[in-house]
Amino acid sequence: MQVVREVQERWGPFTVYVHPAWRVDFPFAVHGITGRPRTPQGERLVLGDRDAFVWELGRLARLDRMVRPEQVHGAEVLVVHPDRLGSELDGATADALITGAPRVGLAVLVADCVPVFLVDARRRAAGIVHAGWRGTAAGVLEAAVEAMRADLGVEPSELHVHLGPSICGRCYEVGPEVFEALGLPAPPHRGFLDLADVLAARGEALGVRPDRVSRSAYCTRCDAERFHSYRGEAGTSARMAAFVALR
């Protein structure tokens, strides 16, 4: 697994962090995760209407539609088909989205949980996953990879997977019940967990090639000047938007 430091781009009132190699290798796709807003207007959007926040990102990316589900820390996958882009997507509940439809942005909101970006260059398919410990334990990554295979014909060995900025293993202290839920040896008391490492191992167990898995060098709590952290900001309501779309 490669460790990557995302590069910054200016998108109107936002700073967007982008995988530097993906920007070059996958010109058919647009992806990124917002950091702290650059302007008061961006701050108002982040702290205000979340749909308006996500739609503004879609406008800046020149997309026709943005899809943002209600996230419940589960394993439900929303498959966004080109012929089903109507109101049935509004208010859908899911923690993962996949699509082969062009100009449709898929977005999840995070503030310590791991945003997982999925791209297949051969099939021109993409996905985004919101993976906290509960969703990871429920199998949200496995469900997303299986949905990409079943619905879009994407084999795991063809996938490129990037684990975006999230809370790191030095900052994420959890109880033994979390280790048990993830099928890991549990410490007698509280311990530190690297959820991105857990997800990387799960991806590779599904058949994703290790050389096609990368993780961000950024920690949302350590890099507080760049990102929002739920733990670091005592339950902040601010979120970053992680998104992917096919051009």
Image (cartoon, rainbow, N blue to C red):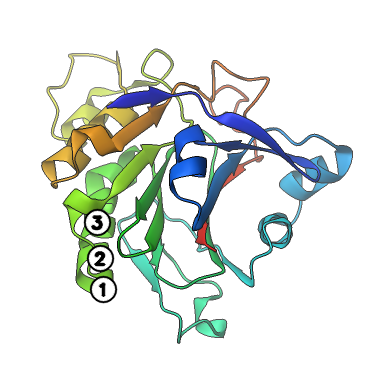
Image-quadrant location for residue 240: top right
Q: Are marks 1 and 2 in contact (CB under 8 Å)?
A: yes
Q: Amino acid at mark 1?
A: Asp
Sequence-wise, the earlier of marks 1 and 3 is 3
Asked if residue 220 can be seen in this view, the reply is yes
User: Residue at label 3?
Assistant: 145
56 horizontally vs 122: left or right = right
Q: Quadrant of residue 182?
A: top left
Give the number of the disc on residue 151.
1
- The one nearer the camera, 52 or 235, is 52
Left or right: residue 100 versus residue 89 is left
User: Looking at the image, which is closer to me, 156 or 26?
Assistant: 26
Where 85 falls versus 228 (above or below)?
below
Residue 243 visible within the image: no
Q: How many marks?
A: 3
- Whether tag 1 and tag 3 are in contact, CB under 8 A, the answer is no
CB atoms of marks 3 and 2 within 8 Å: yes
Q: CA distance from mark 1 to mark 3?
A: 10 Å
* Picture coordinates of residue 206, whole percent (x, y): 14, 47
Residue 42 in picture, x, y percent from top left: 80, 44
Q: Mark 2: give few (<14), some (14-19) or many (20+) Cα within 10 Å.
A: many
Secondary element type, mark 2: helix
User: In the image, residue 91 lies at what x, y percent?
Assistant: 54, 72
Q: Which residue is mark 2?
A: 147
Name the image quarter holding residue 86.
bottom right
